[in-house]
Image: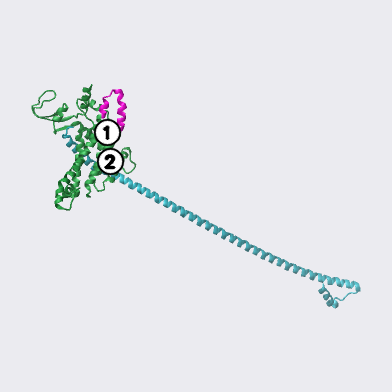
Amino acid sequence: MAGSASEYIQHHLQNLTYGKLPAGYERADGTVIEESTWTMAHNAAEASDMGFWAVHVDSLGWAVGLGLIFLILFRMAAKRATSGQPGGLQNFVEVMIEFVDTSVKETFHGRNKVIAPLALTIFCWVFLMNLMDLVPVDFLPQLFHLMGLEYMKVVPTTDVNVTLGMSLSVFALIIYYSVKVKGVGGFLGELTLHPFSSDNLFLKVLLIPVNLLLEGVSLLAKPISLALRLFGNLYAGELIFILIALLPLWAQWTLSVPWAIFHILIITLQAFIFMMLTIVYLSMAHEDNH
Amino acid sequence: MNINLTMIGQAIAFFIFVVFCMKYVWPPIMAALQERQKKIADGLAASDRASRDLELAQEKSAQELREAKQQAAGLIEQANKRAAQIVEASKDDARKEGQKLIEQAKAEIEQERNQARDALRGEVAAIAIAGAEKILETSVDASKHNEMLEKLAAEL
């Protein structure tokens, strides 16, 4: 049972990976491929041997699908948006937009047309991706297993690639707006001349490496913490669902129901935190008051 | 936990979604929201204005009512005065008429009395003469005693 339990867990945590295997690679079933080929990984070892040139088809597929659901829903509401009496969908969309708009306005005081839609996209998309966590852990993998797909991880945010992809995009925006608002010199000055500063030029130069180290770390910590926080929360949540699924069937609901209810809070909160931190980071990038 | 191309794919998808959201989702809904805000503000202002108008109209109507009442009261007073005047005048007329009638009647009575007195006087004279004749058994020369007789008659 112990072996099958750990196999079960590992199986659930394995992405459906499509990637390139090098020539001469011995596959799981013992065959040796002669040329380097793009193929679906048959087990975890193959997936990790594919290295960087691989795609988690399930993560990306679900992420894009959920993003499309969000956009189509909101686009429908936007098309039919009326200043008269709003319908149900428009009401919902307006509530979301008002909520995001208020959050942005409270934190970000500059004028930037990108930040509010960006925050809305982040919140809704991350929320939807997190929401997949509430689908019972075996439903979709079993379904896809019947369709012949070995692995299926349905919660994109439990894939660190997905969260990193988003947080690095936010990081790029941070850099872009820092440079745009403060100029290259201003941005570099912010990195090198603070927090330790001196009127003595020599001392100032001497302090540059120290400052660069401190500011560099704090700058790089932003995307990393952003990605890992979301990933860690959702990965842990998913893992607990998987562990609960190992219990006998009659006992599962005693743990899975409370955890799922608690998880409703977590997934909303994590989506909100990701959005809020993005706004805060971008607002910091716009401010020039070191 | 393999870091791979998924990350880049996710970043590209993220970028596209944000751009789509920024172009096609956010502006129309925001516009609708702002327009509705404006509409509501306008509606509230209009209702404010309407209630103020109503108040003014009520005040005006009350004022007009008061004026009308005053006017009516004035008219009634005038009418009363006029009526009193008319009554007074007609009373006056009636009194004058009555006076005139009375005077006329008095004059007639006077006249008739005078006539009657004259007649009586004549008759008395005649009777006196007749009486005297009887007393004297002689005829009285009327012409002789006429003077006396007339004096007598005047005393009556």
Front position in the image: B58 or A176: A176
Q: Is residue B127 visible?
A: yes
Q: Quadrant of residue B103?
A: bottom right
Magenta stretch, main secondary structure, is helix
Tell me residue B96's x, y (percent).
66, 66
Q: Which residues are magenta?
A: A240-263
The crowd level at tag 1 (other Cα within 10 Å; few <14, some 14-19, many 20+) is many
- In the depicted structure, whether residue A154 falls above or below residue A80: above
Give the residue displayed 24% in from the left and 29% down from the top: A239
- In the depicted structure, whether residue A10 falls above or below residue A99: above
- Which residue position holds label 2? A78
Q: Is residue A290 left or right of residue B121?
A: left
What is the display colour for chain A?
Answer: green
Q: Label 2 is placed on what type of residue?
A: Ala
**Is residue A260 covered in magenta?**
yes
Q: Is residue B24 visible?
A: no
Dot 2: what SS?
Answer: helix
What is the display colour for chain B?
Answer: cyan
Which quadrant holds the N terminus of chain A?
top left
Residue most extreme to the top: A1
- Which residue position holds label 1? A131
